[in-house]
Amino acid sequence: MKLLITGHSSTIAKELVKIIKIKSDADIYNVGRNKDSNFYCDFANYSSIMNFVEKVIEKKRFDYIFLNHGILLGKKALDLSEKEVNDYMMVNCFSIIAILEALSKYKGINIVVTSSISSKEGSYDPIYASTKAGIDSFRIRCSSIFDSSVRLNFISPGIIKDALMTTSREDQENVKYISNITPSRELTTSYEVAKLVHFLLSEPGNIHSQDIAINGGISLNK
């Protein structure tokens, strides 16, 4: 069995790989710009995305796919450069939708896409939240384009305690505040997210086209 992972340098992806290696013997293929990537793709570049879709997605067969790439710049809209706006749209929105459209011709694939709590609740960074909301809008209408044997689901974590985008934040007092007001009094860990991803990839059953929140109850994913 073959698994394709984008955003493989993230802690979530690394934890998922650990789980998979314990539970199965799946062949894992990584996508990105790193030298250790099995397939190259710059998700901020239109030509690179289209080349990846044509040469990999449309030519090679995978049983499981985890689309986990994305960027968060943490800026207000007027503080973004033209390139940063383009990067947001291409990485967080267009590349995901383009890949999913290309996958819609296949049967028997289980797919999980990383979204965000901000797709429902908004964010200090409104463009990031808007790109995630765009993916959620696609999710709501996309189930009919896939074969009945496909399972496509989305996960929307809140703040992830050990993610680089959290540990590198300058406003750690705000991170602590959010942890304290979360009903569980805990922030989600990358391992917890990875366990959910593994379940949705390996045993989704009749779960399809859902956006599953994992945030300690701070959002009911309305």
Image (cartoon, helix red, strand yellow):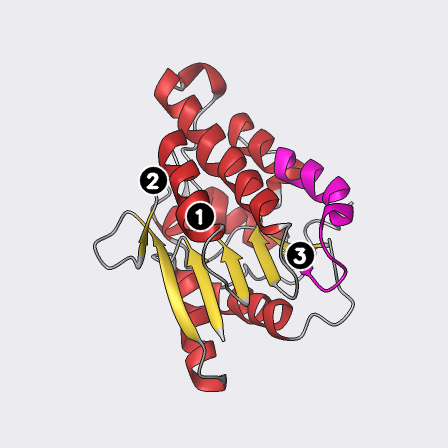
Query: Mark 1 falls on what kind of element?
Result: loop
Distance from disc 2 to disc 1, alpha carbons, whole Å, reads: 10 Å
The secondary structure making up most of the magenta span is: helix
Magenta segment, which residues? 133-152
Q: Is residue 202 visible?
A: yes
Residue 133: horizontal and vertical position, in percent? 64, 35
The residue at the point 75 percent across, 51 percent down is 220
Quadrant position of residue 74: top left
Residue identifier under label 3: 153
Q: Which residue is mark 1?
A: 69
Mark earlier in primary sequence (3, 1): 1
> Is residue 102 highlighted in magenta?
no
Determine the residue positioned at 68% across, 51% down.
Answer: 218
Image quadrant where residue 111 sits: bottom right
- The amino acid type found where label 2 is placed reads Asp
Q: Which residue is mark 2?
A: 42
Q: Residue 163, relative to residue 136: is it above or below? A: below
